[in-house]
Image: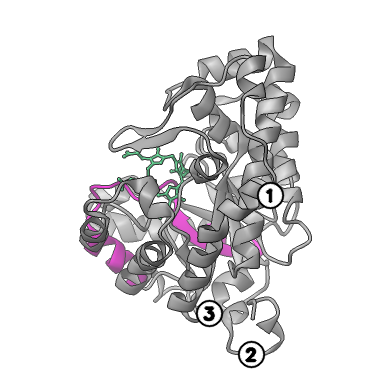
Amino acid sequence: DHPFLRSAASGGVADAPLLARLRGEATTAPASVWFMRQAGRSLPEYRAVREGTTMLEACVKPDLVAEITAQPVRRHTVDAGIFFSDIVVPALLAGVGVEIRPGVGPVFEHPVRTAADVDALPPVGDAYEAALDPIREAVALSVRELGTTPLIGFAGAPFTVASYMVEGGPSRDHLRTRALMRSQPEVWDRLAAWVAELSGRFLRAQILAGASAVQLFDSWAGSLGTDMYAAHVQKHSAAVFAHVADLPVPRIHFGVGAAHLLAPMHAAGATVMGVDHRIRLDEALAQLPEGTPLQGNIDPAVLFTSEQARFAEARAVLAAGAAASGHVVNLGHGVPPDADPQVLTDLVAFLHEQR
Ligand code: CP3
């Protein structure tokens, strides 16, 4: 019953123009769009169902996950759902002490900075596979709820997840993480390989349960220079993609402020590059193999401008993306919690009038 098994028949999820674009196939359909962080605090219906449940508790309640995943699709008629979860959910399921503090972000009980800290991480085996069951169930329920709208699964890339573990929580410049790579590269490698195993299995479980595409978030990779990325990070992100490379679904890779890393992030095993708003899509394309589909990259700041400025930006993004073999519209980064949902709904309607 998986979407890619149904792909031979027409009218199924696999025919969705958004997926055709992610595969780099030509289509005359209206523009395809979804938004990073489309589910979440910008929606009153999200705040209502989350009431009394912590973020990480919510992530292991399959019914609640499916409901939250579907909310922005119902409201905005975006062309894909993004699975409601978090990049630290795999660590939680593996048995690591982590919480998400509202307004702060993920905070780890024990920062991981030494060889002994890495030795103390739980093994990734049968117990972890069993702990993924609520995720499989939540994906299956979400897919059913979404009908012919595709579900995009996701995971956090080793650098971004490990940076929270090394720093202990959110950090501006990830100094301790970069210092660990430079001073104890073998400790860093063992930590990043551990995260890659968690994230890789998390992604694979989502695809096998019905996700039609996946996105690997290396949100903070932009704080790395090209040499550091090549020496210490690319192989670990490649290990995540290797977990799902045998499955016929598009693999999107995204980082913030990572314009200098587009080529090596693509070479890690992505089939589509997510691009933030700091670089034009046609400039991004010039750094990538011919025919690479792109996703992005409306500046989230236009959500707080006039409609005229917003639609002008949307048109400019579509024009720049036309050079790619497939282009799926998104924001350059996530929906800010204080964005007006009506602005997003109107932006989707506008995009659906464009080609
Ligand atoms: O709609 C979606 O995009 C799907 C769900 C999603 C969440 N987190 C839900 C969430 C996704 C794809 C993520 C990934 C994630 N989590 C990333 C990569 C994406 C990015 O934004 O670059 C990162 C860096 C995290 C870590 C994280 N989790 C942060 C920084 C925060 C925000 C903390 C805060 O309160 O400001 C979270 C919590 C989180 N993840 C929320 C949501 C909806 C807010 C929690 C709440 O509603 O209380």
Q: Earlier in the sequence, mark 2 or mark 1?
A: 2
User: Which residue is most to the bottom?
Assistant: 10
Q: Quadrant of residue 267?
A: top right
- SS category of the residue bearing label 3: loop
Q: Amino acid at mark 1?
A: Asp
Q: Quadrant of the N terminus?
A: bottom right
Q: Is residue 185 above or below residue 87?
A: above
The spot of residue 351 in percent (x, y) is 40, 69
The spot of residue 49 in percent (x, y) is 25, 61
Q: Is residue 19 above or below residue 337?
A: below
| Ligand 1 falls in quadrant | top left
Check contact, mark 2 vs mark 1: CB within 8 A: no
Q: Which residue is painted at 48% across and 78% down in the image?
A: 144
Which residues, given as a range, are shown in magenta? 321-350
Q: Amino acid at mark 2?
A: Ser
How far is mark 1 from mark 3, CA to CA?
44 Å
Q: Tell me if mark 1 has few (under 14), some (14-19) or many (20+) residues whose alpha carbon lies within 10 angstroms of its own.
A: few
**Badge 2 is on which residue?**
10
Q: Is residue 352 above or below residue 208?
A: below
- SS category of the residue bearing label 1: helix
Q: Is residue 252 visible?
A: no
**Badge 1 is on which residue?**
126
Q: Which residue is painted at 46% across and 57% down in the image?
A: 330
**Badge 3 is on which residue?**
29
